[in-house]
């Protein structure tokens, strides 16, 4: 852009500002350059004033010094720059005019047309004052007075932390500002106090606030935070007004009363603390309302009396030493629908954990425990597991047997249920891996694995048949040998490179007594690209694939300027003829497995696509079809997700049910700082996929639509969300959310 074009565009914008009704206060930058510490002369002593100027006159009778042309004065970290300064040495009065700039020890810079102050350069009065704060923000007033302690008192003033110029350097109205009859700025407190204040958004006056104060810069101070306003079908209009209580530089409490038009109020409290070794946070909610946890299951037994309800959520992590750390989380709710009713979470299980870990270059130790609270209205809490303790130790020996790497693992787990199966497990394992590259370029990995298990189980009849073991004590010995060969072929293609890698794996394992022990952690097994070449394709330790098999596949990678493609496809064949412990629907129940694959495509930073699939080995019917795509830029983008699980089994076990779902989301930046966003989740499952399903093939779960404005100091948004499912007293319906966040205000 030419300089004349820039000046013309700025003049047009300035004309718009002038034609609008504005206050006399000028927030724009002044032409005067601030006095820098290097340019200011250094006084010989703290009680002396040093100055420099282009020209100097001294009236010996009146003892008056007149300095003109780039005048600079300094005293005790107070610096002044002006075109002209008249200094009466008898009275100590200093009068400066022309492009004035005064800097205090905190780094704040005050500008004005004329200033009258004492020779300490600390106190004085300024006309047409502008104060640019070192920690961000600026104040402007018709007239300001600075006292000796640094306090600045302003009359008919305005404050804003927002930018007052565009990216092209043209003046603009700040997104928001505070106008007040009287403003007091206390640098030692880093806080601004207002009397007769009013908040202006986009130049329009909105909220009158007779008394108001806000901190300057990023520091935390006690005070009110930005309000949260919602409207829902169940609770009515909700207004939440948080108050932050600063207890120190590293800790604080936020108290938030939630007031509803249709139900009793709710109180929220959050405590956060940061120490040299870690941090923790605890949040709690408390209210009273009617509980109806089981309305979706049995209306006759619904509990609808007034009851105290709440939720507690805590998280902590501490690094005790370079190797030792401790962490934990706490999530407990009074009932199963509280979180959904008050729009706090949509989780169907809450998990509380505690762990201590030690990690170094070659070993890992974890001592942990966890507790699960179910929020599903049809689940029994007594069947939920409590693990205490869970101990896992691993040690790697880099200089192992026969040149390979040897890893030792010791593991124990005790699971207790108040109304169900109890299990204690312990095992010790050794794994040896040897990786070599042949002269022809093949990558060969040899693996040997041995493990010994000990189990003790009680009350197995309460567990599903497919997962239960035998009561009492049982042992199990596990062994496996594997050879994995990858042979990459690399060449140039279309100005880039491509890589084709055939892969073959042979695994040999003897028959095991898998059904004698319970299955607690290996239930959700499903063949996919991530576990196709795994030594054990069960996700946990309680089941081990006891068959000899050959797994073969092909990997392909293409790297072009701005484009990359990564794909893998494979299948396995069971060499032994004995029946498999892998049940129907997993893709592994027959000798030939289903065909699985993954394709990833990336085009610059504009398109990212991942497709995972599983094809039936007989008719190539699609048993798993999963697509995730991101299209667009950082400001405007589209998110797509689709999942269909068609395992073709009935009756399905609890971890192998068919599902079909689509997820869509996106954001469109339609103007500078403005954007619109939306997202939706739709259940596409029908009775052909799940005969027990009540869905009709198009059952929306929830959607969200909103618009938002966000710049350097303001975020303003309106969101409409609708839930389509009832869960107890968490009813379907519309919810509206208004968000407003102002920099330095409401924190």
Image (cartoon, rainbow, N blue to C red):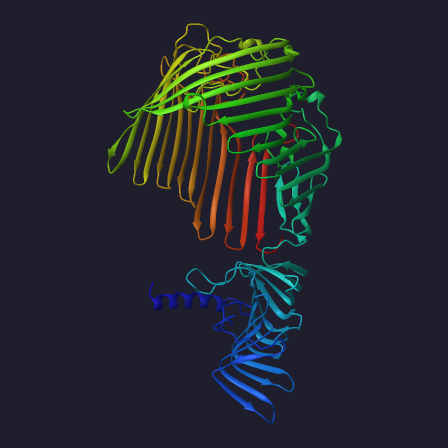
Q: Is residue 500 above or below residue 80?
A: above
Q: Residue furthest bottom?
A: 61
Residue at 68 percent of width and 35 percent of height: 311
Residue at 58 percent of width and 51 percent of height: 741
Q: Nearer the viewer, residue 132 or 26?
A: 132
What count of labels does the image hold? Answer: 0
Residue at 52 percent of width and 14 percent of height: 652
Which corner quadrant of the image does residue 467 belong to?
top right
Q: Is residue 465 visible?
A: no
Q: Is residue 599 above or below residue 230?
A: above
Which corner quadrant of the image does residue 475 belong to?
top right
Residue 605, how many percent across, how many down?
38, 42
Q: Is residue 605 visible?
A: yes
Q: Nearer the viewer, residue 697 or 308?
A: 308
Q: Is residue 357 above or below residue 294?
A: below
Q: Nearer the viewer, residue 427 or 468?
A: 427
Q: Left or right: 35 with respect to 94?
A: left
Residue 305, how many percent across, how many down?
75, 29
Q: Is residue 456 above or below residue 641?
A: above
Q: Left or right: 560 with respect to 385?
A: left
Residue 615, how many percent across, how many down?
38, 18
Quick one: quadrant of the N terminus? bottom left
Residue 108, how many percent across, how many down?
57, 67
């Amino acid at each position: 852009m030419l300089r004349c074009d820039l000046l013309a565009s700025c003049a047009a914008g300035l004309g718009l500002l002038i034609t609008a009704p504005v206050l006399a206060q000028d927030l724009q930058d002044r032409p005067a350059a601030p006095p820098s510490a290097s340019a200011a002369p250094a006084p010989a002593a703290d009680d002396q004033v040093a100055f420099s100027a282009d020209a100097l006159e001294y009236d010996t009778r009146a003892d008056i010094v007149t300095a003109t042309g780039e005048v600079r004065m300094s005293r005790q970290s107070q610096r002044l720059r002006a075109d002209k300064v008249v200094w009466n040495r008898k009275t100590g009065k200093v009068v400066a005019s022309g492009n004035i700039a005064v800097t205090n020890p905190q780094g704040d810079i005050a500008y004005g047309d004329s200033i009258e102050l004492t020779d300490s350069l600390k106190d004085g009065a300024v006309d047409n004052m502008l104060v640019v704060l070192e920690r961000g923000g600026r104040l402007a007033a018709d007239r300001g007075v600075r006292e000796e302690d640094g306090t600045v008192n302003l009359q008919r003033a305005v404050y804003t932390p927002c930018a007052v110029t565009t990216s092209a350097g043209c003046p603009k109205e700040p997104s928001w500002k505070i106008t007040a009859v009287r403003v007091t700025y206390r640098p030692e407190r880093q806080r601004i106090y207002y009397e007769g204040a009013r908040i202006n958004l986009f130049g329009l006056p909105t909220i009158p606030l007779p008394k108001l104060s806000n901190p300057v810069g990023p520091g935390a101070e006690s005070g009110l935070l930005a309000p949260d306003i919602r409207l829902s079908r169940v609770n009515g209009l909700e207004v939440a007004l948080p108050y932050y209580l600063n207890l120190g530089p590293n800790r604080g409490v936020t108290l938030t009363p939630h007031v509803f038009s249709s139900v009793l109020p709710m109180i929220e409290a959050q405590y956060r603390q940061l120490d040299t070794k870690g941090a923790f946070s605890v949040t709690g909610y408390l209210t009273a309302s009617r509980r109806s946890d089981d309305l979706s299951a049995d209306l006759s037994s619904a509990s609808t009396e007034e009851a105290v309800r709440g939720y507690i959520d805590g998280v902590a992590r501490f690094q005790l030493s370079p190797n030792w750390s401790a962490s934990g989380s706490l999530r407990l709710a009074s009932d199963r629908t509280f979180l959904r009713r008050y729009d706090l979470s949509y989780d169907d299980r809450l998990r509380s954990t505690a762990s201590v870990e030690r990690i170094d270059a070659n070993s890992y130790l974890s001592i942990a425990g966890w507790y699960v609270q179910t929020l599903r209205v049809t689940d029994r809490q007594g069947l939920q597991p409590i693990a205490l303790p869970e101990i896992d130790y691993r040690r790697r020996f880099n200089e192992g047997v026969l040149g390979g790497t040897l890893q030792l693992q010791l593991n124990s787990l005790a699971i207790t249920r108040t109304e169900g199966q109890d299990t204690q497990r312990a095992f010790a394992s050794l794994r040896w891996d040897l990786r070599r590259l042949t002269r022809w370029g093949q990558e060969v990995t040899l693996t040997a694995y041995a493990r010994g298990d000990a189990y003790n189980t009680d009350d197995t009849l309460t567990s599903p048949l497919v997962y239960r073991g035998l009561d009492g004590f049982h042992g199990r010995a596990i062994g496996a040998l594997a050879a994995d060969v990858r042979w990459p072929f690399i060449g140039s293609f279309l100005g880039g490179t491509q890589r084709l890698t055939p892969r073959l794996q042979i695994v040999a394992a003897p028959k095991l007594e898998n059904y004698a022990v319970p299955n607690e952690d290996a239930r959700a097994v499903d063949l996919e690209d991530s576990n196709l070449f795994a030594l054990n394709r069960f996700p946990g330790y309680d089941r081990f694939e006891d068959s000899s098999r050959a797994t073969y596949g092909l990997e392909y990678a293409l790297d072009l300027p701005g484009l990359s493609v990564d794909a893998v496809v494979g299948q396995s064949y069971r060499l032994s003829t004995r029946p498999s412990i892998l049940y129907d629907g997993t893709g592994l129940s027959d000798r030939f497995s289903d065909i699985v694959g993954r394709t990833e495509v990336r085009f610059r930073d504009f398109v990212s696509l991942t497709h995972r699939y599983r094809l039936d080995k007989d008719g190539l019917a699609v048993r798993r079809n999963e697509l995730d795509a991101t299209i667009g830029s950082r400001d405007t983008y589209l998110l797509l997700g689709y999942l269909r699980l068609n395992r073709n089994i009935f009756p399905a076990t609890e971890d192998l049910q068919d599902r079909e779902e689509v997820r869509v989301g996106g954001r469109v930046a339609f103007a500078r700082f403005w954007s619109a966003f939306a997202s939706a989740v739709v259940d596409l499952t029908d009775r052909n996929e799940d005969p027990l399903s009540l869905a009709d093939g198009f059952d929306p779960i929830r959607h969200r639509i909103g618009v938002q404005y966000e710049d350097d100091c303001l975020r303003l948004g309106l969101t409409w969300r609708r839930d389509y499912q009832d869960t107890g007293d968490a009813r379907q319906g519309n919810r509206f959310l208004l968000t407003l966040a102002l920099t330095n205000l409401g924190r």
